[in-house]
Image (tube, rainbow, N blue to C red):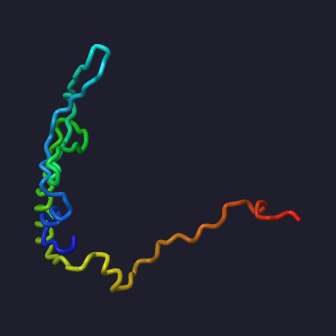
Amino acid sequence: MTGCANGREALSATGLARWNIRKVHQSGTAIILDGATSTENPEKVSPVRTDPRTGLTRCLSTVGKDYGVQQNEDSAAVLDALVAESGVVASPKPANSMAASAPSSRPSRRRPPRTSKAPASAARVNP
């Protein structure tokens, strides 16, 4: 991410920070002739997040009850530590700007142009 000094700044810039991911129990409501009935799903939970822009809770998925929740910021700290240990210095240029400044040594992976798949007899016009 251009202009970000670390993973936390990149998460904030992309809207992936402050999600407050947590697990909630699943339940459902069925509408029946006599009214409504509710049921629990004890084997599954829903990881949910708080949308930092609106404050609303959003469901992410359905997972097993033993699923471990990790905040995005926790992953950013691990990545920052790996980058620091490697000695790599982040470039202020976007990654795609390198393509314009240096020719690629990779062979082209472009496919040849498609040819018509019509049978040869279909291409002939009878006089």
Q: How many marks?
A: 0
Q: Residue at x 64, y 67 (%)?
A: 115
Residue 39 falls left or right of residue 85: right
Tell me residue 50's x, y (percent).
15, 48
Residue 58 lies, with reference to residue 25, above or below; the image says below
Tell me residue 109's x, y (percent).
47, 72
Residue 44 lies, with reference to residue 76, above or below; the image says above
Tell me residue 67's x, y (percent).
18, 41
Query: Which residue is at the front of the view, 40 or 109?
Result: 40
Residue 34 falls left or right of residue 47: right
Q: In which quadrant of the rendered view does residue 74 lie?
A: bottom left
Query: Which residue is at the front of the view, 117 or 27?
Result: 27
The quarter of the picture where the N terminus appears is bottom left
The residue furthest top is 34
Tell me residue 38's x, y (percent).
22, 22
Q: Residue at x 20, y 79 (%)?
A: 91
The quarter of the picture where the C terminus appears is bottom right
Residue 16 falls left or right of residue 102: left
Residue 123 falls left or right of residue 6: right
Q: Residue at x 86, y 63 (%)?
A: 126
The residue furthest right is 127
Query: Which residue is at the front of the view, 84 or 31?
Result: 31
Q: Residue at x 17, y 51 (%)?
A: 54
